[in-house]
Structures are given as structure tokens and as C-alpha cells.
Image (spheres, grey):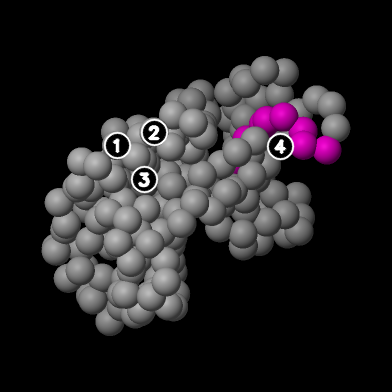
Amino acid sequence: MAHGSAKIGAVPDSIQAAPTGRAKCRGCGKPIAKGELRFGESGPNSYGEGEATTWFHLACGALMRPEKLGPVLESQSEELPERSFLEECVRVGSEHPRLARLVRAERASSGRAHCRSCRELIAKGDWRFALQTFEEGRPNPIGTIHAECAEAYLGTADVLSRVRRLTPELSEEDAEALSRTLTQQRPGLAKTQGSEEDEENQHGSGSA
């Protein structure tokens, strides 16, 4: 039974209970439990004509697809678990669109990857944030940023609670270390911000 929907073309986005436990969340890649409420986003069918629906945990939908989940939340009046949390994620995600690109926090496994924001190498063992965009409903990894570049790239460094939700395996010790790192924000560099904007103009913002 659908709990709410918002029309996009012929197929509405919706919130509904998962009839089985076989579907995986398109955002985090983990299974959606049978009976759990999930967010369904409609879009072009990559394998044929018409449209198809991709599924997200409600929390992942709010964190990664706020512009799509928001209208569905507004259209329905039934009680939802963590509704205030979902609405807050949608609100903050609308204010800072790049927040929807966040996938998880992690320690850099090598020192070879460059930060998408400052373009400098991310040292092995340093905290970084993995990023992705969505293209035709499919997640597309786009690299990582230093945790210290959150303000410059995402528009805010107030991301710890969001990151902990996206990375549930973080220990308390890890969360405390990441929290300290987030207080050491780097200034944005005009030339790298410009190259980022040029790239977005060519490939889209990634929040759509």
C-alpha cells in the first residue's frame, strides 16, 4: 500500500512498504527489509521503454535524494517513522544541494587519490568523504574530498550526524576523531572552485 506519492510523468514517486526483502537500496546498496517503508523514485527505464522505479531506504532517500523525496513527504499525512528527521534532511539538503552527494566517511586507503575540492592528494589514513551523483537513477562515484574540505565543497561542515547515519559502522572513537577533523576546515581555492563549476556545467550538478 502506498503511503504517499508525487507525480513525475506517468509514474508517481511514492513511499510504500517493501513486499519482500530482495530489493537493495540504490543509495547505500544494502537490502531493504521486508515490510520496511521505502522511497520509490520513478525515472527512465534503462533497459527498455517507459519508466522504472528505483528504491531507497527512507533515510537514504532523505539524505541522497531530498529534492525527490520532499514532494512525497508533503503529499501524505500518514505517520512515518522519523518523519521530523526526514523533513530536516530534506530542508538542509535543499539549502546545500551538494550534501546529497555524500556517501560515507572513510580513512584513505592510499595516498594516491586527489581531493575533488582542493585537488591536493589525500594522505593515507586521513579522513575523507566518498561522493556520488545519480545519472538516470544510477549512482555514479565521483571521487572523494578531505573531511577538512567539507565547508568549501558541501557548503557546510555540520555533517557529523549525517555522516554517522550514512556510515553506521563508525565507532565512537572514529566519530570523535572525525569530529575533531571537521573543526579544521580548509579555505576554498578560487581556481579549483572554478574548475569544479566548469565540470558541473558539462556533466550536470549531480543532485538531479
Q: CA distance from mark 4 to mark 3?
A: 23 Å
Tag 2's secondary structure?
A: helix
Which residue ends up furthest to the right in the rendered image? 48
Horizontal arrangement in the rendering, residue 31 relative to residue 168 (left or right): right
**Marks 4 and 1: which is nearer the front?**
1
Q: Are marks 4 and 1 in contact (CB under 8 Å)?
A: no
Residue 198, label in figure: 2
Give the quarter of the figure containing the N terminus. top right
Residue 163 visible? The answer is: no
Residue located beneath label 1 in the image? 194
- Amino acid type, label 2: Asp
- Amino acid type, label 1: Gly
- Amino acid type, label 3: Leu
How crowded pointer 4 is (Cα within 10 Å; few <14, some 14-19, many 20+) is rated as some
**Marks 4 and 2: which is nearer the front?**
2
Region rendered in magenta = 38-47
Residue 148 visible? The answer is: yes
Counting from the top left corner in percent of width and height, residue 62 is at: 45, 43
Q: Quadrant of residue 124?
A: bottom left
- Against 74, residue 3 (above or below) is below
Horizontal arrangement in the rendering, residue 44 relative to residue 162 (left or right): right
Tag 4's secondary structure?
A: strand
Q: Quadrant of residue 31?
A: bottom right
**Marks 3 and 2: which is nearer the front?**
2
